[in-house]
Image (cartoon, rainbow, N blue to C red):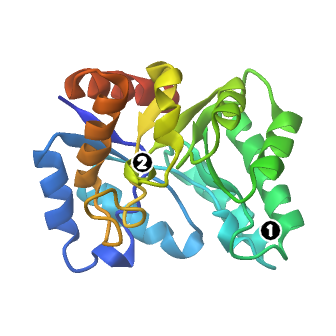
């Protein structure tokens, strides 16, 4: 059984003390494919180091995270462009709009989001979307850019059934992580109405640890708890769901 964590920040400082232990533990439990989203240029070298340590398991993305869109965002976007010419990447992400922490850069966030979607189309790559308190804004940009060349993953999906179907209409898979195990997560109430062909697994480690680890550091191994919850929701075996969601990730990332 091969399990894919489609979204994990294993280069984060949260793993500086025990990164190898965390990665090897996950691999030993069957989590053998890790897709690594970018944040900004300050993490580029750490991501490259991670890939070098585990070349058969780590697959990098390039991008500028919406919460890191500041006054220098155009310089950061130039860095993303430069890295795409120098290195093999499997997606543009994570990109999108986040209005939870700060609404003062909404225009710049939308501009950066659209610019990076265009980059993804140029390089024929999927996008990985970050959306927090910003479904309307994200869908607005997706509507402008919708085409057969637009595809990817709606990371950490926490919306309604209607929003799920809308995301899927833009050729997005839904990234399902720890939130599906939360009592107030809500997505577990309708997820069984969404075909498994639209679902991929993720952790967003070190964030959003699933029950029973909620509030603690998340790890890629804990994608097994997400898998277990989906097994209950869909009434399918964990092996089946692991196979389907890993195949879905192969469809998106091309590997």
Side of 126 relative to 243 (left or right): right
Q: Nearer the viewer, residue 12 or 164?
A: 164
On screen, residue 88 above or below 194: below
Which mark, by number, is residue 74? 1
Side of 18 relative to 62 (left or right): left
Quadrant containing the N terminus is top left
Q: Do the residues under discs 1 and 2 have CB atoms within 8 angstroms?
A: no
Question: Can you see residue 57?
Answer: no
Q: Residues within 10 Å of mark 2 (few under 14, many from 20)?
A: many
On screen, residue 63 above or below 172: below
Mark 1 vs mark 2: give the one in front. 2
Locate residue 66: give its quadrant.
bottom right
Residue at x-position 42% and y-position 27%:
250
Locate residue 163: give its quadrant.
top right
Element type at marker 1? helix
The residue labelled by disc 2 is 177
Quadrant containing the C terminus is top left
Element type at marker 2? loop
Residue at x-position 29% and y-position 31%:
232
Whole-percent x, y for residue 150 in the image = 71, 30
On screen, residue 6 above or below 203: above
Residue at x-position 49% and y-position 51%:
185
* Mark 1 or 2, nearer chain start: 1
Whole-percent x, y for residue 76 in the image = 70, 69
């Amino acid at each position: 059984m091969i399990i894919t964590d489609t979204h994990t920040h294993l280069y984060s400082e949260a793993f500086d003390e025990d990164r190898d232990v965390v990665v090897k533990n996950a691999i030993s439990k069957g989590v053998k494919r890790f897709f690594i989203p970018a944040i900004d240029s300050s993490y580029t070298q750490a991501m490259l180091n991670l890939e070098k340590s585990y070349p058969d398991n780590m697959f990098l993305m390039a991008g500028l995270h919406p919460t890191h869109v500041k006054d220098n965002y155009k310089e950061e976007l130039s860095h993303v462009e430069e890295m795409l010419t120098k290195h093999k990447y499997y997606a543009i992400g994570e990109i999108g709009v986040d209005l939870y922490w700060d609404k003062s850069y909404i225009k710049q966030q939308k501009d950066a989001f659209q610019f990076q979607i265009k980059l993804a189309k140029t390089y024929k790559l999927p996008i990985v979307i970050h959306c927090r308190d910003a479904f309307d804004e994200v869908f607005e940009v997706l509507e402008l850019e919708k085409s057969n060349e637009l595809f990817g993953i709606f990371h950490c999906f926490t919306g309604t059934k209607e929003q799920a179907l809308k995301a899927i209409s833009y050729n997005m898979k839904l990234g399902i992580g720890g939130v599906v195990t939360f009592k107030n997560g809500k997505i577990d109430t309708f997820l069984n109405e969404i075909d498994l062909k639209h679902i991929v697994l993720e952790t967003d480690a070190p964030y959003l640890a699933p029950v029973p680890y909620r509030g603690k550091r998340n790890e890629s191994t804990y994608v097994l708890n997400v898998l277990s919850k989906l097994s209950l929701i869909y009434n399918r075996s964990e092996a089946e769901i692991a196979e389907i969601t890993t195949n879905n990730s192969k469809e998106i990332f091309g590997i």
